[in-house]
Image (spheres, coloured by chain):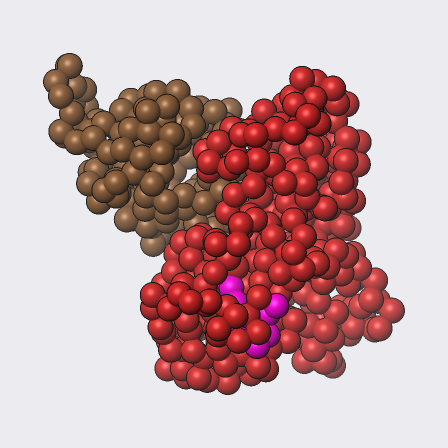
Chain colours: A red, B brown
Amino acid sequence: MRLTAYEQGLLDGAAGEAVRRALVYQLQVGEFFQAEDFVPVRSAHLMADAEALRDDGVALVEELAELGGRFCIPTTTNPRSVDLAHVLTLRQRPVWPARERRLIAALGRLGAVQCHTCVNYQTLDPPLFGEHLAWGDTGAVIWANSMGGARSNFEAGTAALMAGLTGRVPRYGYHLDAVRRPSVRVEVTTPLPDLADWGALGCWAGRRIADCWTVPAFSGLSEATPDALKHLGAALASYGSCAMFHALGVTPEARDAAAAFGSAAPRARWTFGAGELAGVYQTFPPNGEGVDLVVFSAPQLSSFELRDLAARFEGRRVARPTLVTVNQAVRADAQASGYAASLERAGVVLLTGVCYYIMAPQDFAADHGWRRLVTNSAKLANIIAGYGYHPVFRPTATCVQAALTGALPS
Amino acid sequence: MNVPSGGAPALVRCGPRGYGPTVAGPALVSAQGFSARYDVDRDRGVFSRAAHDLFGRSLAGQVLVFPTAKGGVATAWMLRDLRSRGLAPLALVFDRTNPVMVQGAVLAGLPIVHRLTPAPSTAIHTGDWVEVDPTAGEVRVWRA
């Protein structure tokens, strides 16, 4: 890779051992993808939670802090594994808060903005058109590329950590114009009245694509809202490993089909109608009608989603454990607006700075017998199956009903 | 295990330069995507997603061969964690990988290659003896 004089200096140790190691690492990744050079990034978003890092990863972050590493660009944090206010409520095993405290301390020394959120783009750091970023969390990356028109690859926690230290990333993948062009066109012909329906669309298209380097372009999404696109993107990234999509007439690099596709015709054209939508839900058949818990999470909810949920639970009482995850900013909004109190009166547990699948859910399954999980998040339904759960993905109203009655309608 | 004794490989797959040292070991081949978070019980180092075609198999010491990488960004930390506890695969061979898998392999020091032709995930079978040579961008296969 071609290095600037500044980057050569970093490699020679001018900014210390932590930064030198970070640049060596980035060079190895860049050479794998045949990057020609580095590109400066405005911010980094870092997935670093106790459940993923465990002792070895926590020690690595501590070592970089010990070596004097400091983030040279704004570097924000993804959800963590523990809401320290709810360790006892959830009877979480002590190993997780212990690791999480070490991690929070080390990230603090490195200079991270500890927002603990996967919706940084909604509450903290809106991506700008054309800028380069080093973001982790696939849902945040697909938002930045698609809705913002910013440019980021999936930067794993390790890679975003290094980018925060050096202020740059290897220039390959979604930093390049050619990679951002769509090659698949998906015509959506059915209304998508619930947020879960948008996740279902992402699930359906993602399963068919299953490739990080394929970009779909959707038409028929003129009813989109930011939260709807959030669910679409999170599901598409989760099921398809997709890092970008276009919505014709909605997203900035696709004012119309001509702008999105240029002279290249799509290699495939698919239609998503009412039958396909119903079909997605049918791929999550319940295991009997019983329900162990209901989770609204992945991505963390916006203030608008929380407002909607508070109205649905107002004056009622849950019959099964019901968890909702938000970030600190939305938590503060919800307290000021009364939504938090409404939900808590109904027995809903509002968790802050976490996401369910990051909370060592395998322990909850073993310790509490939680298996049959109902959620309106297509993404959560995908991930949680690897932790020994039987997920049932359903529209929001069905999830609320399951929480209130402890059963799924047959 | 049928370790080759100097004979010519049955198959050679070529692609761009990968990352890591040359290693050899038995292949564990999947027709599905790979994510350490979505598919693996990391306490035991085995595939734990019931619907995965490698369900119940251990990763340790295997050359994992997958058509594609999938899922989120957590896999990168997880490969290093698995390596630190002796549960990591020997090498990763993908038809086409995503950045996360490479970022994780480099952090963990695990050899990784991709974009070999024809696609390794259909040409290599579980139990074949596979030599992964990232510097040459080659995968050499001896049939079990």
- x 53%, y 54%: residue: A177
**Percent from the top left, x then y, of residue A269?**
35, 73
Q: Is residue B30 magenta?
A: no
Residue A132 visible within the image: yes
Report the label total: 0
Side of A169 relative to B9 (left or right): right
Q: Which quadrant of the structure image shows residue B94?
A: top left
The structure residue drawn at horizontal position 56% and vertical position 53%, both measured from the top left corner, is: A138
Which residue shows up at 34% across the image and 41% down it? B115
Coordinates of residue A284 in the picture (x, y in percent): 41, 68
Residue at far right of view:
A336
Q: Nearer the viewer, residue A85 or A261?
A: A261
Compared with residue A59, is residue A228 higher up or lower down, i.e. above or below?
A: below
Dominant secondary structure, magenta: loop
Pinpoint residue B13: horizontal percent, then vertical percent: 24, 33
At 71% from the left edge and 27% from the top edge, which residue is drawn? A6
Tell me the quadrant of the picture where the C terminus of chain A can be found. bottom left
Viewer-closest of A213 and B48: A213
Which residues, given as a range, are shown in magenta? Answer: A245-252
